[in-house]
Image: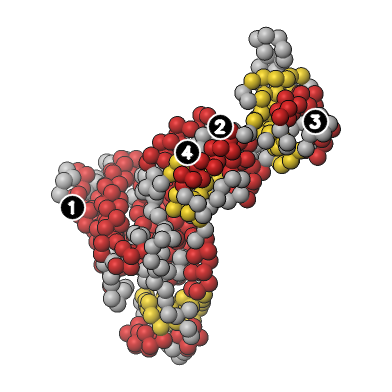
């Protein structure tokens, strides 16, 4: 945080949480160590959310009365209370270590020197919280980011290492964002090395989930420091275990058990051996007044009974890890070839998703960015991906995204949403990428497309005025005038050599979808769907 201002700290924490939340499922799907329970992203998000909720209870006027020392300690306790799972508890200790360093220097402006010290303290606290720390985990990644900040100090001028009172808030934020972004780059490299350090990651073909989550959190912090809706630094997408790779580790115990013990004179050393006799992945952190307990066990009640007479057991949370693993495996083990489709309109998005596609929202102009398409490719639960751009204007961006993708990806050049939808019906998820591309491209050759939209301006040839209905068939204007007559004429053109015409109703269509039968040629078989798309009253496709 740049200073003890609640508003600024809240902005940074909120941005960090948003960055993690945006890719929380990606982090979950990477999780294979210490057990493959698939909830690392959830647990880290819960920890950050607890800190943010505590911030929401503190108003800006009370900051001066509370003071930074009390404030950061309060937030550290909130992180501890909200933590769940190995990753959440370790993250809470990172927060605690940083908080203790910040609290030890009251009155000092938060600058690169203090941030580096806070990160070093946080890394020590995280390592100390684990009985047998393993390299190639979030511990390693955070330590590397802490080392990065320390190394940077040697290359910073004295006025940037230690900021004076004459530095504005904007300058302070910019300097901190700059050094943290370099630390993120070092953190990403550390994440990429984790499979070299941990055998289970190497066998499963993944990077460490917690380490990746930490880098995403840091990226959000940088975005929060820069403010004004700044995007976080781009972080590489990481693939879940491929279906063809060996199965990852599981725990021989069933329940991930978390609870708080509140009392006085608490001593974690007295119960650690007894907890370890009940299960594995044991973490006990806190102080004499509050202990956070995490253990994987088949006997959650027995773990809690160990603290009878020592303190009150509260905030109990028990998760069935076997169920989590089953749900995760069911989600990931779906397809060899997947599809990413660009769509606009709630109904169309549902139609694509119902046919198994991952949808990239195109917005009003049906024009997603390359990075959005790349994120869709990486997020698809398949080894290979076809991209349906749904617009001629999106094809180049889609091809660029496929070229940048770390997994095999290819564009099927559908130039409309209705064409993409009809091509998608031909997908065989079990077949290879090239085979599916050929199937979908062949389907496109048999589809004629059109649509009816209101004219945006008067026609230079005098055929129609702004607001009139204009009908298109394969890119050519074929009808105009009233909505009903234009619909009838356009469908007639498309249906000339077709067996069935698909009609997709838009958000502002002047004729309800259940009434369009009265405005199509007799004998034409219709398939109707609510698309909710903007701009086009009806999208049409004929096969």
Q: What residue did someone put label 2 on?
A: 415
Front residue (pair 441, 267): 441
In front: mark 2 or mark 1?
2
Spatial CA distance of label 3 from label 1 is: 72 Å
- Secondary structure of the residue carrying tag 1 is helix
Q: Position of residue 7 (x, y in %)?
A: 44, 50
Q: Earlier in the sequence, mark 4 or mark 1?
A: 1
Q: Is residue 171 left or right of residue 45?
A: left
Spatial CA distance of label 4 from label 1 is: 44 Å
Q: What residue did someone put label 4 on?
A: 411
Instruction: Tell me if mark 2 has few (under 14), some (14-19) or many (20+) residues whose alpha carbon lies within 10 angstroms of its own.
Output: some
Spatial CA distance of label 2 from label 4 is: 11 Å
Spatial CA distance of label 3 from label 4 is: 34 Å
**Quarter of the figure with residue 295:** bottom left
Q: What residue did someone put label 3 on?
A: 520
**Quarter of the figure with residue 272:** bottom left
Front residue (pair 174, 102): 174
Q: Earlier in the sequence, mark 2 or mark 3?
A: 2
- Secondary structure of the residue carrying tag 3 is loop
Residue 234 against residue 467 in the figure, above or below: below
Residue 264 against residue 396 in the figure, above or below: below
- Secondary structure of the residue carrying tag 2 is loop
Front residue (pair 314, 28): 28
Q: What residue did someone put label 1 on?
A: 151
- Does any portion of residue 271 appear in the rendered image? no
Q: Answer yes or no: do the residues labelled 2 and 4 have beta carbons within 8 Å? A: no
Spatial CA distance of label 2 from label 3 is: 24 Å
């Amino acid at each position: 945080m740049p200073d003890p201002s609640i508003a600024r700290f809240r902005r940074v924490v909120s941005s960090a949480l948003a960055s993690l939340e945006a890719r929380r499922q990606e982090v979950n799907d990477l999780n294979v160590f210490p057990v493959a329970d698939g909830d690392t992203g959830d647990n880290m998000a819960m920890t950050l959310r607890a800190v943010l909720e505590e911030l929401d209870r503190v108003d800006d006027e009370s900051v001066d009365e509370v003071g930074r020392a009390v404030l950061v300690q309060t937030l550290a306790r909130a992180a501890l209370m909200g933590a769940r799972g190995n990753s959440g508890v370790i993250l809470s200790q990172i927060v605690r270590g940083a908080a203790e360093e910040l609290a030890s220097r009251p009155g000092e402006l938060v600058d690169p020197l203090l941030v580096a010290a806070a990160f070093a303290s946080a890394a020590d606290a995280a390592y100390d919280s684990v009985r047998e720390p393993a390299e190639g985990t979030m511990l390693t990644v955070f330590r590397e980011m802490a080392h990065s900040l320390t190394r940077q100090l040697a290359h910073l001028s004295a006025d940037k290492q230690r900021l004076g009172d004459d530095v504005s808030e904007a300058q302070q934020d910019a300097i901190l964002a700059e050094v943290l972004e370099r630390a993120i780059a070092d953190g990403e490299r550390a994440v990429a090395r984790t499979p070299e350090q941990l055998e289970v990651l190497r066998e499963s073909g993944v990077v460490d989930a917690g380490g990746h989550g930490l880098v995403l959190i840091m990226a959000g912090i940088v975005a929060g420091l820069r403010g004004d809706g700044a995007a976080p630094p781009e972080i590489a997408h990481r693939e879940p275990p491929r279906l063809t790779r060996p199965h990852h580790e599981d725990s021989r115990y069933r329940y991930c058990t978390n609870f708080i013990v509140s009392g006085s004179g608490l001593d974690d050393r007295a119960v650690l051996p007894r907890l370890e006799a009940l299960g594995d992945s044991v973490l006990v952190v806190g102080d004499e007044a509050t202990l956070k307990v995490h253990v994987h066990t088949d006997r959650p009640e027995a773990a809690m009974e160990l603290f009878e007479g020592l303190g009150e057991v509260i905030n109990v949370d028990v998760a069935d890890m076997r169920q989590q693993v089953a749900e995760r495996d069911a989600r990931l083990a779906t397809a060899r070839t997947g599809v990413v489709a660009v769509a606009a309109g709630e109904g169309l998005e549902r139609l694509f998703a119902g046919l198994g596609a991952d949808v990239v929202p195109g917005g009003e102009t049906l024009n997603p960015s390359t990075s959005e398409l790349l994120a869709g490719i990486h997020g698809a639960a398949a080894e290979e991906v076809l991209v349906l751009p749904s617009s001629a204007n999106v094809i180049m961006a889609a091809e660029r995204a496929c070229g940048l993708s770390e997994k095999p990806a290819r564009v099927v050049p559908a130039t409309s949403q209705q064409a993409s939808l009809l091509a998608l019906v031909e997908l065989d998820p079990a077949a290879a990428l090239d085979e599916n591309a050929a199937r979908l491209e062949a389907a496109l050759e048999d589809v004629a497309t059109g649509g009816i939209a209101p004219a945006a301006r008067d026609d230079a040839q005098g055929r129609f005025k702004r607001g009139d209905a204009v009908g298109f068939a394969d890119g050519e204007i074929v009808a105009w005038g009233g909505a009903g007559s234009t619909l009838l004429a356009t469908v007639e053109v498309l249906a000339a050599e077709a067996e069935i015409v698909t009609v997709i109703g838009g958000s502002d269509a002047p004729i309800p979808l259940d009434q369009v039968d009265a405005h199509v040629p007799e004998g034409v078989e219709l398939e109707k769907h609510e698309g909710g798309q903007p701009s086009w009253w009806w999208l049409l496709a004929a096969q």
